[in-house]
Image: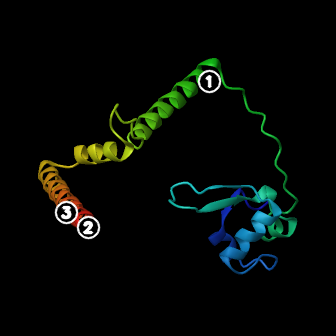
Amino acid sequence: MKNSQEWFSVTELLEKKISSLPTSDKGIVKKASREGWEKRQREGVKGKTFEYSVYTMPLEVQTALGFSQRLTKEPDKSIPPSQDDLQKRIDQLENKLQALETKAQGFVQPKPPEGLTNDEWQLVCAFRRCNKDRQVGLLATAEALAAQTEKEQKESLAALEVRAVA
């Protein structure tokens, strides 16, 4: 075995110009996915950049990478985590869950108080989220729209009364 590297990025595989591999990054990704190569997120790189384990690559790829015999990964004989490790992990997960719940509450509107419709409650919530200047603008707009609606209703009633008299 000449090579000791266990993980290879798509770029590294392309640079090796291995005849049994596709010549494009998308081609290699498709082949790896189709053949079930083990992959992991590349450390220190943002985005969806993966590297692939040499242990799950075909024999001809392993050979081209400098491995003299077929490599297979032995199952991990890891030590089971201690009770303290498990409790620490549970605590971490509970803290993350609580943070997510708190964050999610900011997106969920509470039920409207008695006497308000959902639309009215949405207006109140939107009003409260605005700064003072925008609150003044919202009030002025709402008052102008209400006055316009009242005027239209009066005109409509007057027209109905004229028709009723005629």
Residue at image point 35% right, 31% down: 114
Residue, disc 1: 86
Q: Is residue 94 left or right of residue 80?
A: left
Q: In the rendered image, which residue does mark 3 sit on? A: 158
Looking at the picture, tell me which residue is in the foreground, 148 or 37. Answer: 148
Q: Distance between the residues labelled 2 and 3?
A: 9 Å
Residue designated by label 2 = 163
Q: Earlier in the sequence, mark 3 or mark 1?
A: 1
Q: In this view, does 96 lie to the left or right of 139?
A: right
Judge left or right: residue 119 versus residue 161: right
Rounded to the nearest whole Å, what is the CA distance between mark 2 and mark 1? Answer: 82 Å
- Within-10-Å neighbours for mark 1: few <14, some 14–19, many 20+: few
In the image: residue 105, left or right of residue 23: left
- Tally the numbered discs: 3
Residue at position x 71%, y 56% in the image:
6
Question: Residue 27: x and y, percent?
Answer: 72, 76
**Which of the pair 86/57 is nearer the observer?**
86
Q: Quadrant of the N terminus?
A: bottom right
**Given this view, does label 3 or label 1 mark the residue nearer the observer?**
3
